[in-house]
Amino acid sequence: MNIMKSSHILSTFLLSFTLTCTSSSFAIDDDNAMLNHIYHHFNKAFNTLDPQEMLFIYTQDASYISNNQNKKILLGRKEILEQYRAFFKKINDKKANIDVDFRIIQRHVEGKSATDIGYYLIRYYPDSGDEEPISEFAGKFVGVSKKYPNGHWYLVVETNNKADTAFYYNAKPQPNLYYGRQFTPINSEPTTTYE
């Protein structure tokens, strides 16, 4: 009787442990999927030149630290949105298009906080009537996100620096982390930064 009772207790414990591990694994996979979704919003914003898409990316009190030494730290989603509005307007006024994509090389998730580290690539397509070539530039970034009760993640802090495009192209995919499209490398060096 004691052996049967012990066996039952052990099997109950193992089942409970397995269910906990499995649900924990699902939670991590769900968090990864939701965090990866942030980068889809960035893609959409750049493809459509729509700054309103930033409402799905940044918290109300987010901070953005630009790589430009002549720009202040932007505090709050409103300031960040204004920066993107001005940036997208420049692109639109030139009748150009722009693409962005990301490759996350490391992610740390602790509770309701996550930190993504990776590279981005921005590609600029001039108006077809211009003689200007397609250009691109890359950077490295750190983004800190916060999970809200609805299960969505939003950026709280973002900072970036310029980097050689080779770092983006050579970044290896990591399991469950966002890994951008397969841009075909172009050989031209960017002559202008579009900030």
Image (spheres, rainbow, N blue to C red):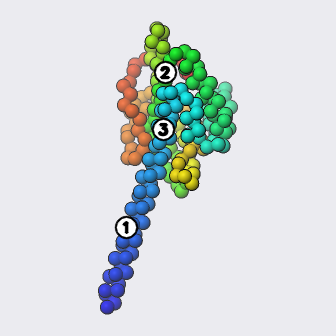
Q: Nearer the viewer, residue 92 or 87?
A: 92
Q: Distance between the Cα atoms at labels 2 and 3?
A: 18 Å
> Can you identify the residue that label 1 sits on?
18
Give the amino acid at mark 2. Answer: Asn
For the N terminus, give its image quadrant. bottom left
Horizontal and vertical percent position of residue 12 = 37, 76
Horizontal and vertical percent position of residue 185 = 38, 24
- First of labels 2, 3 by sequence position: 3
In this rendering, the label closer to the viewer, 2 or 1: 2
Q: Residue at x 36, y 73 (%)?
A: 14
In the drawing, does residue 45 fall left or right of residue 17?
Answer: right
Mark 1–mark 3 contact, CB under 8 Å? no
For the C terminus, give its image quadrant. top right
Secondary-structure class at tag 2:
strand
> Can you identify the residue that label 3 sits on?
39
Give the amino acid at mark 3. Answer: Tyr
Give the amino acid at mark 1. Answer: Thr
- Would you place residue 112 above or below residue 186 in this image? below
> Can you identify the residue that label 2 sits on?
97
